[in-house]
Image (cartoon, rainbow, N blue to C red):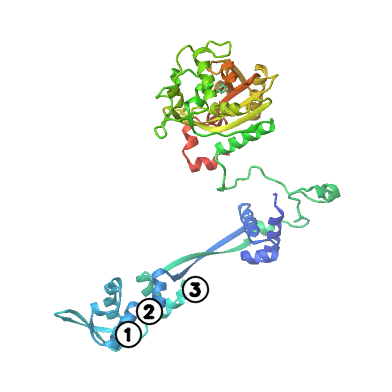
Amino acid sequence: MDLSSNEIKILKALQGGTLSPSEASLSSGLGEKETMSAAFWLKSKGLVKISEKSTIFYLANNEGQKYAEEGLPERRAAEWLNQFGESLIEDLPLDEGEKKVVIGWLKRKNYVDLEKTEDGLKLIPTGNLNETPDEPLLVLLNRRPISEKKIDKEGLALLKGRQLLETKEETTRKFSLTPDGQNFDLNGIDDNLIGELTPEMIQSGVWKDKTFQRYRLDTHVEPTDHATLHPLTRFTEEIRSIFLQMGFTEIEGDYVESAFWNMDALFIPQDHPARELQDTFYLSEPASFVINDEETMDRVKAIHEDGGETESIGWGSDWSREVAQQALLRTHTTVGTIRYLSEHSEPPIRVFSVGRVFRREALDATHLPEFTQVEGIIVEPEANFGMLIGVLKEFYRRMGFPDVRVRPAYFPYTEPSMEVEVKFGDRWLELGGSGIFRPEVTAPFGIDCPVLAWGLGLERLAMLRLGIKDIRMLYQSDLQWLKETI
Ligand code: PHE
């Protein structure tokens, strides 16, 4: 049988006979917690018996405390009656609740006689003011809890009956050896096992003469509650550290944006279906923004209408300033990227963001109207499509998805464009879009080297990592699930 050092110490201590936990702790030299846990392990191994005895203690409850200090209502009433003479119940200096119970007790304790009169019940003091056992007891129980055995029975019955007490249970334990424990041969057993091997032990070589504590990996331990971060917070941290290690800087943006930055600056045509009410949350307060960077507006307008100074022919229709100035909840974090580029056009640039985006999606097992995108760009003269694929593959590999493939796709702002998929089990799951920004996007901001860009979904990735089938789980605050999710 494998015993730990602590268990051996307790076994040795118990050879002298039955011990309480504190005695066992004293004679083994272990702390109280260690003593307890070693004793319970020894119990589970059949070597120690733990007998438990529980004792009930009584103490005054809130109402009892009040009466212990002021005196019981019948005591106060009787003293008052003895001083002022016979009176009606209404005249007693007691509160309403006390008046309801006091007559019964005054009678029972023989402090008054009762007489029915036209004005009501009259209380006539008997002159008896003798103390009953409940009174001194209540004072005692207001000072400290007393065990049932040591309490005056009559006083206890009275106080319990009036609900002036509360109880507390204390369990006392005794440890003793079972027959197996008595027969256990402790001769030659080292109770100084090495539980943890330290660098010092290795350097000095002391470990050579020692016995190692054996571990049982199949031991069942009760799960304990622990504080933990929400999985989405943890994944966000993980993603941050991956991009930071890859030389990226983090950027942030606002949830409320103009259509201009969210769409127009990204060459999304003004009649694009994604702009429609059923896809985008527009705001009513503010309903629009005044964009007064006229130069940028003019360049974006020209690009949309006829391609401006680029070789593009644009979308070939009139561009409306009102449409561009509409206020909305950002539909993708690419808005933060283009805003950043509008102020930083000098390569090299490597920035990323992790942020909430909003789309008018119906809520179901795979769609959320609010979700999180992991966005990034690389702006370097030598940047190319192969590099983009390489960076995304590396990102997913570091997130724990070694199999990544790309498919051609379409976004109004990138060319070429691709969708990234990761393999999970035997399925390929689409996790995000990416591509190289078109000249129509970069030209108005004077950027003339390639911009590799991507926007990836965080929640879907989280679903794969956590093995959940319903995306809503991530936002339901199911505490049980959150605690179990590591
Ligand atoms: N913005 C795109 C989306 O929301 C993703 C994307 C970002 C695509 C950058 C290409 C470049 O799906």
Nearest the viewer among 171 and 188 is 171
Q: In this figure, which residue is indicated by the disc labeled 1?
A: 79
| Above or below: residue 159 compared with residue 213 | below
- Between marks 2 and 3, how big is the CA–CA gap? 18 Å
User: Where residue 13 appears, x then y in whole percent?
Assistant: 69, 63
Q: Residue furthest right?
A: 204
Identify the amino acid type marked 1: Glu
Q: Quadrant of ligand 1?
A: top right
What SS does tag 3 mark? loop
Q: In this figure, which residue is indicated by the disc labeled 3?
A: 144
Is residue 202 visible in the rendered structure shown here?
yes
- The nearer-to-camera label among 2 and 3 is 2
Identify the amino acid type marked 2: Gly
Label 2 near label 1: C-beta < 8 Å? yes
Q: In this figure, which residue is indicated by the disc labeled 2?
A: 71
Dot label at residue 421: none
What SS does tag 2 mark? loop
User: Where residue 313 appears, x then y in whole percent?
Assistant: 53, 10
